Amino acid sequence: MPEIDDLDAIDPGNVSDDDLLVLFDVGGGVAGKVTRAQFLAGVAMDGGDHDFGTSEIADLSATVLAAGTVDVATRLNLGGGANLTDILATAGDLVVGDLTAATGSTHTLTLTGAATTDHLIATLSEPIADGLTWQAWISATNTVSFRFWNPTAGTITGATYSVRAMAIRTT
């Protein structure tokens, strides 16, 4: 007689509700039989008519959770007083030329929908040259400005920087 592990699986689509399944309780040494329908009674299955017994959701319109208030359509409140209403993101490459001592250059990136009152997170993917500094801000509607500055006494060789910008709007 083959071991249970050696038996082939039967496609569930080929088993009817009145077919018998053999069950063996290894711990108690008891064997028995049950129909597929009895074995799966109360189990929600794809495409079935589900009866969740005593499970009940009383109010699907509730927006208050332990972490804060959620209104997926318009805002997210995490309990700190501010409502998160929008997150916008973009990425691009900025070509910064050579910068002589005590000079800088400003470059822009389009971030559609950004407002000057939004919070900005900006990152550069590559390390910047020694001595070079940079800052970013939303300088106008739909526009993020990146300012690169050379505060050193020598020239800093230009480079291309991959940047990412994310505007976060709160109310």
Image: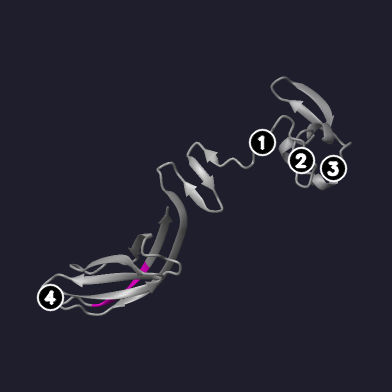
Residue underneath mark 3 = 15
User: Which disc number belongs to residue 154?
Assistant: 4
Camera-side mark, 4 or 1: 1
Which span of residues is magenta-colored?
Answer: 158-163
Tell me the SS state at disc 2. loop
Q: Mark 4 vs mark 2: which is more N-terminal? A: 2
Q: Position of residue 151 (x, y in %)?
A: 15, 70
Q: Quadrant of residue 131?
A: bottom left
Rounded to the nearest angstrom, the CA distance separating label 3 from label 4 is 80 Å
User: Which disc number belongs to residue 7?
Assistant: 2
Question: Crowding near pointer 3: few (<14 within 10 Å), some, many (20+)?
Answer: some
Residue underneath mark 1 = 57
Amino acid type of disc 4?
Gly
Q: Residue at x 75, y 42 (%)?
A: 45
Residue 160 among magenta residues: yes
Tell me the SS state at disc 1. loop
